[in-house]
């Protein structure tokens, strides 16, 4: 597995280009502002074929360039069904944040539900539904490579916000306890913002995880 990571857009989102090097198949995890311009040259340089554009959740800063990336790559847009309404109409949440940039609405080409698997060459990602920060938030875990793309569920030293519609601290805590902290400690966590971390590090150093574990 090769992971190309970039920080894009005014909210400093991470966008991940994940490739199975043997096959040249790739997927994009999240699509923040400026993602298409950033990823285009990388795709050409490495001659990758993007199969999927995965939205970990539907908040506007993570789905802003789904449509642009689909035009660029022809890849299928995947999300959890509970968050597809945010892909179709991101404007209410953008207005709530006072954010003026335009986001082109899109529909999902395929849904990802809890327990599904997503194959990329020889890689197999397990899908877990992890609501709390967003109703339809998902994470992708590849056990052989020991990586998890976890969106805004958990960050290095922090966790996702739960102070706007569709959020719940109790639900987020359950998602983290059941689907993140049960992964091996050396699993690397690639979050929607900030630096990568590991499950073990967050167990030791994240004050929110300490609260969850009691």
Image (spheres, rainbow, N blue to C red):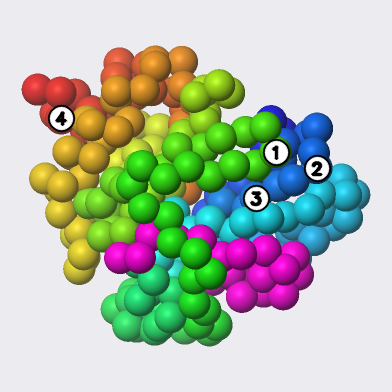
**Residue under numbered circle 2:** 24
Mark 4–mark 3 Cα distance, whole angstroms, equals: 32 Å
The residues bearing labels 2 and 1 have C-alpha atoms spaced at a distance of 8 Å
As drawn, is 127 to the left or to the right of 64? Answer: left
From the image, tell me which residue sits under label 4.
Answer: 212
The residue shown at (56%, 51%) is: 29
How far is disc 2 from disc 3 in space, using C-alphas?
A: 10 Å
Task: Answer whether residue 147 is magenta in the image.
Answer: no
Q: Are marks 2 and 1 in contact (CB under 8 Å)?
A: yes
Residue at the spot 43% in from the left edge and 61% down from the top edge: 111
Which span is picked out in magenta?
Answer: 64-82
Where in the figure is residue 28, as x and y percent of width and height? 63, 53
Residue that label 3 marks: 27
Task: Identify the secondary structure beneath mark 4.
Answer: helix
- Judge depth for marks 2 and 1 and give the one in front: 1
Quadrant, the N terminus: top right
> Whole-Å distance between the Cαs marked 4 and 2?
40 Å
- For label 1, the residue is 121
């Amino acid at each position: 597995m090769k992971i190309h990571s970039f920080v894009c857009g005014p909210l400093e989102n991470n966008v991940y280009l994940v490739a199975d090097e043997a096959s040249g198949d790739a997927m994009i995890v999240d699509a923040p502002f400026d993602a298409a311009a950033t990823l285009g040259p990388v795709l050409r340089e490495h001659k990758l074929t993007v199969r999927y554009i995965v939205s970990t959740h539907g908040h506007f800063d993570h789905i802003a360039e789904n449509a642009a990336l689909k035009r660029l790559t022809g890849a299928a847009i995947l999300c959890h069904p509970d968050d597809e309404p945010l892909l179709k109409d991101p404007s209410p949440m953008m207005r709530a944040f006072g954010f003026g940039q335009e986001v082109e609405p899109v529909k999902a080409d395929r849904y990802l539900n809890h327990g599904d698997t997503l194959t990329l060459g020889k890689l197999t990602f397990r899908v877990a539904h992890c609501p709390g920060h967003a109703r339809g938030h998902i994470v992708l875990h590849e056990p052989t490579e020991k990586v998890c793309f976890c969106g805004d569920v958990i960050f290095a030293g922090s966790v996702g916000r739960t102070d706007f519609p569709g959020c719940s601290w109790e639900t987020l805590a359950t998602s983290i306890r059941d689907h993140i902290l049960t992964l091996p400690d050396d699993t690397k966590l690639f979050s929607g913002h900030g630096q990568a971390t590991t499950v073990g590090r967050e167990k030791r150093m994240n004050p929110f995880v300490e609260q969850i574990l009691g």
